[in-house]
Image: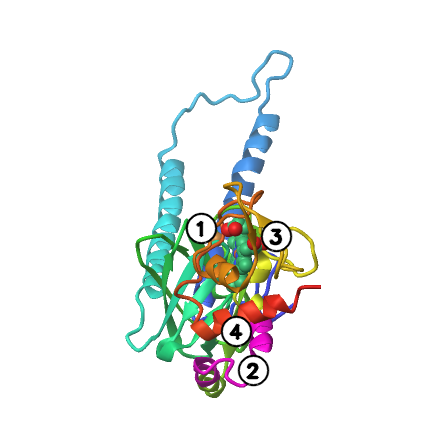
């Protein structure tokens, strides 16, 4: 177990996590104590004063006790007021973004996350951030509602189509943390899993720089192979022949495809390029039109790279 990890919660790894956990534990313990008092109190009195041989076990006819009633009104009221003010102050901390926060744009799309950093750097399904710096995430979606959820940071925010939402965090330790989509978004929802990679500030700057000139040292085929996983093609397309949400890439180049409108087409460079940039133009028969467009996500060289990579998968 990591430090601070419990049966209920993974290790707290952001600046607000400790406070969220403290409030969670306070509510949990207070409710548990009250639960036992109420349930066992009821059971005790029900047994102790049950009717026996048709006779009542109690003698007093009293139906009212002012002192008791004041106590059991005031104590819960105090508890609720504590939870309100504590919760409200934590809520403000979680929602008011520090002014000097780093800006990152996140887009949810069936079924992956796309991140855009300053200077044109980008990544898919892996959010890279520096440790000890506030990071503001501006969220949106190109299709349905997704939700950006990092359990270790105790943050969760919906990503909506046609509207921006925001969340922020400051990671307190380096490491790799799970990023889940917390809003059911279709058949690939369970595969919409990413990571948040927290690195030192120096590593972050290096990463940004290298990413902006990404793939320049690679051949097209090598770059294409990298993009196949880093751009999440692998969530829907296999390379070993197994059918998935989309057709397998094994042997795709030169393959005769039956389209939904009944026509046949040979998968050549132009067809593959169109399938990536404008996937709804030609739908392969037997599949749903669910492939997202990569129009503004892939650079030209990256599309070339994917085409070249797919060619190498023909047997
Ligand atoms: Cu989703």
Mark in the foreground, 4 or 3? 3
As drawn, 42 above or below 32: above
Which residue: 53% across, 64% down? 269
Mark in the foreground, 3 or 2? 3
In-front residue for pair 287/207: 287
* Residues at circles 3 and 2 in contact by the CB criterion of under 8 Å: no
- Specify the quadrant that holds the N terminus: bottom right
Q: Earlier in the sequence, mark 3 or mark 2?
A: 2
Q: Kindly state the secondary structure of the residue where label 3 is placed.
A: strand
Image location of residue 59, percent across then percent down = 51, 21
In-front residue for pair 153/167: 167
Which residue: 35% across, 46% down? 77
Q: Which segment did they paint magenta? A: 207-226
Q: Residues within 10 Å of mark 3 (few under 14, many from 20)?
A: few
Which mark is on residue 256? 3
């Amino acid at each position: 177990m990591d430090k601070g990890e419990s049966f209920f919660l993974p290790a707290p790894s952001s600046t607000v996590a400790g406070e969220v956990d403290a409030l969670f534990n306070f509510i949990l313990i207070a409710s548990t104590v009250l639960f036992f008092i109420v349930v066992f109190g009821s059971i005790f009195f029900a047994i102790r004063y049950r009717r026996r041989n048709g006779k009542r076990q109690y003698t007093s006819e009293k139906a009212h006790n002012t002192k008791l009633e004041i106590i059991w009104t005031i104590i819960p009221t105090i508890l609720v007021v504590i939870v309100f003010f504590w919760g409200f102050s934590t809520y403000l901390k979680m929602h008011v973004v520090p002014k000097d926060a780093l800006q990152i744009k996140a887009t949810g799309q069936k079924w992956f996350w796309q991140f855009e950093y300053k200077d044109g750097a980008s990544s898919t399904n892996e959010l890279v951030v520096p440790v000890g710096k506030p990071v503001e995430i501006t969220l949106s979606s190109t299709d349905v509602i997704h939700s950006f959820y990092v359990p270790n940071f105790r943050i969760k925010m919906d990503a909506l189509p046609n509207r921006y939402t925001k969340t922020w965090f400051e990671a307190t330790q380096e490491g790799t943390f799970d990023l889940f989509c917390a809003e059911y978004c279709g058949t690939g929802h369970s595969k919409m899993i990413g990571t948040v990679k927290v690195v030192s500030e120096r590593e972050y700057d290096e990463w940004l720089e290298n990413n902006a000139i990404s793939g320049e040292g690679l051949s097209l085929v090598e770059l294409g192979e990298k993009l196949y996983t880093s751009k999440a093609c692998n969530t829907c397309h296999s390379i070993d022949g197994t059918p998935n949400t989309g057709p397998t890439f094994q042997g795709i180049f030169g393959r005769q495809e039956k389209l939904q409108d009944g026509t046949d087409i040979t998968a050549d460079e132009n067809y593959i390029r169109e399938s990536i940039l404008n996937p709804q133009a030609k739908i392969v028969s037997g599949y749903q039109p669910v492939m997202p467009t990569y129009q503004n996500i892939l650079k030209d060289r990256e599309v070339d790279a994917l085409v070249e990579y797919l060619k190498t998968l023909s047997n």
